[in-house]
Image (spheres, helix red, strand yellow):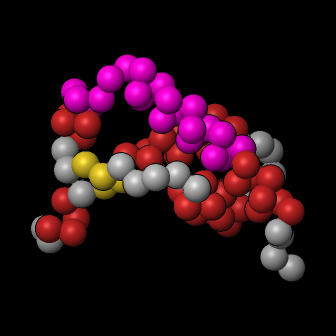
Amino acid sequence: MSFRDAIDNFYERLVVDAIDATREPGDTADFLTDVMCVALNRLPSRYYRHTIDMMFYLADEELRGMKDKSLAAVQGAREFVREHKRE
């Protein structure tokens, strides 16, 4: 395993969860991938090496805030992608 494979961005997990929570009939994989990219570009990076470290050291209030930011970013990204649909 490469050292590059040893880190992740915690917001990726939160954005996936927010996408799952806001999924609508007719959402395609291509649309959701665009939504994920736009949403992640609107959020800060929060890298971690071990999931247990992130969960242990993250205060409940901070996690709730990160989840709220992720949901708002996904909702905004859904609108943005709809308005800028590739033809």
Tell me what residue is drawn at x 22 percent, y 65 percent. Answer: 5
Q: What span is in magenta?
A: 55-75
Examine the rendered structure and indicate whether residue 35 appears above or below residue 62.
Answer: below
| Residue 56 located left or right of residue 76 | left
| Residue 16 located left or right of residue 76 | left
Tell me what residue is drawn at x 53 percent, y 46 percent. Answer: 15
Whether 2 is among the magenta residues is no
Residue 46 appears in the figure: yes
Q: Nearer the viewer, residue 59 or 78?
A: 59
Percent coordinates x, y for residue 31 in the rendering: 71, 62
| Residue 73 located left or right of residue 47 | right
**Furthest residue to the bottom?**
87
Percent coordinates x, y for residue 2 in the rendering: 14, 71
Q: Nearer the viewer, residue 66 or 85?
A: 66
Percent coordinates x, y for residue 19 in the rendering: 62, 44
Q: Main secondary structure of the magenta part?
A: helix
Examine the rendered structure and indicate whether residue 35 appears above or below residue 46.
Answer: below
